[in-house]
Image (cartoon, helix red, strand yellow):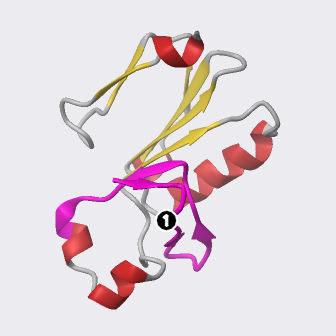
Amino acid sequence: TFNSSTAFRLPNGAIRSPDAAWVTQKRWNALTPEQQETFPPLCPDFVLELRSKSDNMEPLRQKMQEYSDNQLRLGWLIDPNHKTVEIYRLNNQPVEVLKSPRTLSGEDVLPGFVLNLELVWN
């Protein structure tokens, strides 16, 4: 699990820092110690971006699309201002938009993980 202080070098060469990210242990262990200590050269399996009041949604959507284009398995773009979540999945599946969901499931990427959004919405 990584926070926004970790930047990843995506397969397209872009360096991105999600608010939260997760990489499988197997993929992480496949990196050299040097790769782990700099900008890990991979797209996380999971990313979460949380829109702040000052953020414009379009750049965040572009960032999420870029993750998706680089083999992201699951991504959540959470907008507390409008109580919406955009869910991005592997292989550029259509973005799913949820209005005021109470929880989010980690699906098959983070089995058993459930994020309670009621604290975010309140």
- The type of residue carrying mark 1 is Thr
In-front residue for pair 97/44: 44
The local secondary structure at tag 1 comes to loop
Name the residue rendered at 18%, 29% in the picture.
Answer: 112
Question: Residue 117's spot in the image, x, y percent?
Answer: 46, 17
Question: Residue 76's spot in the image, x, y percent?
Answer: 50, 37
Is 55 positioned to the left or the right of 96 in the image? right
In-front residue for pair 73/60: 60
Name the residue rendered at 56%, 25% in the picture.
Answer: 85
The image shows residue 8, relative to residue 71, as above or below, that is: below
The image shows residue 59, relative to residue 15, as above or below, that is: above
Find the magenta span and give its range. 1-26
Question: Residue 108's spot in the image, x, y percent?
Answer: 23, 38
Does residue 94 show up?
Answer: no
Is 30 positioned to the left or the right of 53 in the image? left
Q: How many residues crowd around disc 1 within 10 Å: few (fewer than 14), some, or many (20 or more)? A: some
* Residue assigned mark 1: 6
Asked if the stretch drawn in magenta spans residue 77, the answer is no
Is 117 positioned to the left or the right of 25 in the image? right
Asked if the stretch drawn in magenta spans residue 25, the answer is yes
In-front residue for pair 96/25: 25
The image shows residue 41, relative to residue 50, as above or below, that is: below
In the figure, residue 97 lies in which quadrant? top right
Question: Residue 75's spot in the image, x, y percent?
Answer: 47, 43
Does residue 35 show up?
Answer: yes
Name the residue rendered at 54%, 55% in the picture.
Answer: 4
